[in-house]
Image: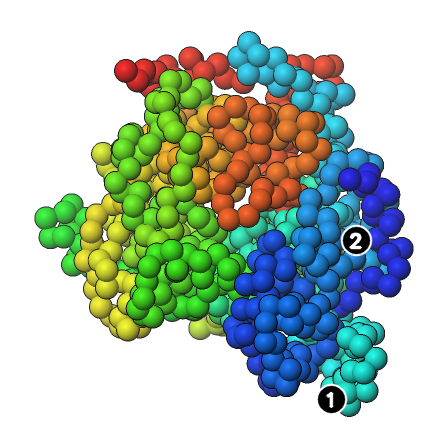
Amino acid sequence: RRPIAVRAFHMARVAGKSFVPVTHVDDPCEASATHLLYCEGPVLEAAQRLRIWPDSKDFVDTATRAPASVVLKAWAEETPSDDASARAFIEKWFECGPRDPDGAEGRLGNGTAGTSGPSIGSHPSQPSIGNQTVSLPDWAPDGPPFAAARFNKYIQITRGDDDVYAWAREFASKVHALWPLLTRPPTPVDKEHSTSAIVGDAKSPSDDDKETTKKTSPVTRVSTAIPLPHNALVPGSRFRETYYWDSYWVVVGLVTSGMTHTAQGVALNLLSLVERFGFVPNGARLYYLNRTQPPVLASIVRLVYEALRDEHSVEDTAELKIWDEWPPPTPPKQKKPRPQTKAVTFARYALPLLLKEYAYLTKPERVVRVEVPRTSKAHKITGDFVELARYWAFTDQPRPESWREDVELAEKSGLDDDAEKKKLFRDVASAAESGHDFGSRWLGDSDDAGGTEKGDVVTPGGFNPGPHRALPAPQSDSLASIRTTRIVPCDLNGLMLRCELDIGFLASQVRDEDIKCGTWVKNSEASTSSSLFQVKAGRRRVTINAVLFDETTCRWRDLLLDENARCPEFAKTAKTYYNMGFTQGVRASDYVPLWCGAFEKDSKQALSVVRSLVKSGLPMPGGIATSLRRTGHQWDFPNAWAPLVHMLVEGCDGFGGDEGQKFARETARRWIKTNAQLLKTSKHMHEKYDARVMGSKPGAGGEYAPQTGFGWTNGVVLFFLNKYVYDGDAASGDFKLRGVRLERLLETIGAQRTTVP
């Protein structure tokens, strides 16, 4: 890999490989043709079956050399008769692969150029992508402001008696330097030829086709990329586009880095998708339009709102003071309206779009009525049934970006009935919608595994794993038993609670501003939403604590519904599903509702959840393991993911009192060290990490190779560096930060280290 500076400046010099912008899908015929080309049909099947690119996602990310309608017409007129002719057709009508960050095409048959994410090195002062300059006016080349303001030359982070140096300021600067490399410029819209295409000087596949292409359509090239109006931050590697729930932790990192303007742009990009489609797709690609991801948009908007409020507080106060002191004009003229703060202006724009997304999130297919047994304690609180959220992808076909994997899964599953295949494909896509794709929580065969709570790995309480049972090499549990739509995820319902709380908060801010300005109306959208979402949040809090909280283990758990929950004919009805009880297994997602505000701050219930987490076996030297199931899937043991680590750390810190704060600080510092150690040895930030040993290696497993970059990892570690590393007065000189000793922490929460016979 070339150093960052060399690679960045090379971007603008790739001969003939300029970055081509993408426009909106406004032509219905061309939009339909694009869908048929990339999301279903014979061309998709041929390209994936022939394995022209090792990664299934590469084909659907590759642009054509002509409009989609022209390519489909060519296929109909010269339908390939064998594999060789099909391969020749693909090579003729499609580019050589997805464009990498250098603006260059990939290589046919050899994967995509530049499969690794950005590596650490010197950074450019004026980053560029292709022939376009990426403007990041709020990015500081010298590093994030908090590092320069708080850290002395270095801070020593230790784990017990094992001293490992982490040069905090240098580490923060290296991670901060990756933001330009993960930034993609906004996409200009070609209003004259708006055809869902990548617009540019598209060359026809051959000289013979040149005249035909000119006569049939404008000079365009089709891509699945959805245009965005502001700078987009991508995760990295194969993930070349904006992703929905990744964006929350990217925004967390941008705000921590003092890049509020860029963070606002990320939020506005997501809001533009809601404005256009009614929801935020899984990612900014046409093939993701049948599903979303965990609902974090309201939290993103609130985070940006608070950042704008704090950043512009002095400026807004001065402007309001001038307005207050300005003498009223001579009658009959009226004084100019009271100026609004920049934060409230942003919230006012976002509020109706958040309500629009909420309507999508609460569609009948995504809300299930769950029976509450009359003999349960919850029945006295909830009545005979409750309404809870689940994941439901609006597709029953193979995922275009993983078409080959889904078709092979259906074949291996031995499903002959088309209806059963459709259920399988929907459950697979719904698991992808969850962001946890894939893991044992969605699988039926995991109920039969042996070990701790029917898991297959034993990890006593505390950060150090302790003795393990002798295990064979992990064998991936088959996705054939997947049952996503039968499961009521506790973390999803927690996130819906947080969504409702954040919408209510933003609405109240807009309402309060209206009152100050004298423009308040009783039944305004802001006034109505403020009170309505307070009620909704209160109802959901009661529901998830009554139905999804396990008092025995002091954690929330996923709920299993009867088989009818998978049937699309029941999805739009008010049918009540039978409660089959909690699913098996201990998972990090079980503790997410604490971060979402399911229990009151410093309450006995919140403290019990913190103690349950510490004793669960999930906290390990390298982070918090996703689960205790060793299945070979990436959202299982031993992988640790930045979003889960962040949510659990912040949940314990914000709601778990002194014990939660101690645990949060220790876990955050271990996560920092894991990231720093692996950055030093691999020169990359990673998508996921192995939780068993601090900084040992990246995570593994799943249906694609481990990725680097990496947006949400960078955001979380910068946030942790800012919040949990500094402890003292940097002006007094160098100082050491020692984490809470494990034994003392375990004594505090009453956990006992056990052994396995």
According to the image, label 1 marks what residue? 216
Tag 1: Cα neighbours inside 10 Å, few (<14), some, or many (≥20)?
Answer: few
Seen from the viewer's position, the closer of residues 376 and 39 is 39
Nearest to N terminus: mark 1 or mark 2: 2
Q: Can you name the residue that lies furthest to the bottom here?
A: 215
- Above/below status of 372 relative to 474: below
Q: Is residue 277 visible?
A: no
Q: Nearer the viewer, residue 52 or 634?
A: 52
Residue type, label 2: Asp
Q: Residues within 10 Å of mark 2 (few under 14, many from 20)?
A: many
Image coordinates of residue 681 in percent, x first then y, are: 68, 27
Q: State the residue at coordinates (60%, 68%).
A: 83
For the residue marked with disc 1, what is the amino acid? Answer: Thr
Q: Which residue is mark 2?
A: 102
| Residue 294 image position (x, y, % from top left) | 47, 54
Q: How many numbered discs sit on the rendered protein?
A: 2
Q: Secondary structure at mark 2?
A: loop
Q: Residue furthest top?
A: 161
> As rendered, which of 624 and 376 lies closer to the eye?
624
Residue drawn at (75%, 36%), measured in percent from left and top?
A: 120
Q: Is residue 512 left or right of residue 201?
A: left
Residue 514 point in image, percent of width and height: 56, 65
Q: CA distance from mark 1 to mark 2?
A: 32 Å
On the image, which quarter does residue 705 sit in?
A: top right
In the rendered view, does 687 fall on the left or right side of 617?
Answer: right
- Quarter of the rendering occupied by the C terminus: top left
Image coords of residue 410 (percent x, y):
39, 60
Q: Residue at x 44, y 48 (%)?
A: 438
Q: CB of mark 1 within 8 Å of CB of mark 2?
A: no
Q: Could you tell me which secondary element the residue under label 1 belongs to? A: helix
